Image (cartoon, rainbow, N blue to C red):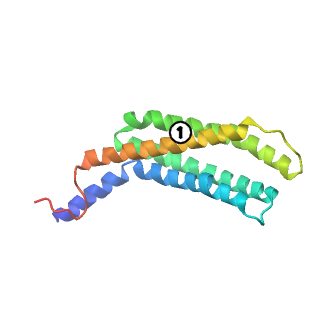
Amino acid sequence: MLLKQQSRKWFLAVIKNPAWVCLIWFGMTAGVSLLATPVRFSAPTITRAIALDVGQVVFAALNKAEFVALIVLLIVVRVSGRAQSLWAGCGVLTLILFAQSMWLLPELAARTQQIIAGAELAPSYVHGTYSILELSKLLLLLYLGFRSMQMLSTNTGDLSPGRDRT
């Protein structure tokens, strides 16, 4: 019975901890931005226009998934009881996500359509700005995730499922 109570307490502490949201969000974003995107452009049989078109669809889907992750993160941070210590980071994540979705992604989508149509465009600061914000978001997610894991070990001590505490 004691083991079951400890396991339940540990599970609830984990679920109420924002680390899992941050690290899943990090993995999702890193997988798309740092892995899938460069690999897509290195495939010899995919034209630049096709790679750009696929990228536009993928980043639009990622953006929607990131908004879901943000909402879940804000709820979990609020429920965690540690909102004050994580709120600034969540605020910065929110600003980055809104800047990307309302300003940068639409501009990049417009450039993509022009390139697909055959236009040769001069380099733009938009892609660099998006990349800097993406890397900043990834670093912030790692920071918030590991900071939250520290909070988990503080909240539960050495409590882990299956550990005998007699």
Q: Mark 1 points at which residue?
A: 93
Residue 62: image location, x then y, percent? 62, 53
Please count the marks in the image: 1
In the picture, measured across the screen, residue 134 lies left or right of residue 121, that is left
Residue at image location 61% in from the left, 57% down from the top: 35
Location of the N terminus (image quadrant):
bottom left
Residue at coordinates 55% horizontally, 39% vertically from top-left?
Answer: 136
Question: Relative to 11, is 83 above or below?
Answer: above
Q: Does residue 48 appear to the left or right of 100 in the view shown?
A: right
Whether 74 is drawn above or below 12: the answer is: above
Secondary structure under the numbered disc 1 in the rendered image: helix
Q: Is residue 141 left or right of 3 when viewed as pictured?
A: right
Question: Residue visible at 70% across and 43% down?
Answer: 105
- Viewer-nearest residue: 128 or 104: 128
Percent across and percent down for residue 14 are 34, 53
Q: Residue 145 in the image: state x and y as whole percent.
A: 42, 46
Query: Quick one: label 1, few (<14), some, or many (20+) residues within 10 Å?
Result: some
Give percent across and percent down for residue 53. 77, 56
Quarter of the image holding residue 7? bottom left
Name the residue: 77% across, 63% down. 46
Q: Which residue lies furthest to the right in this view?
A: 118
Amino acid beneath label 1 = Leu
> Quarter of the image containing the C terminus?
bottom left
Q: In the figure, is residue 16 to the left or right of 22?
A: left
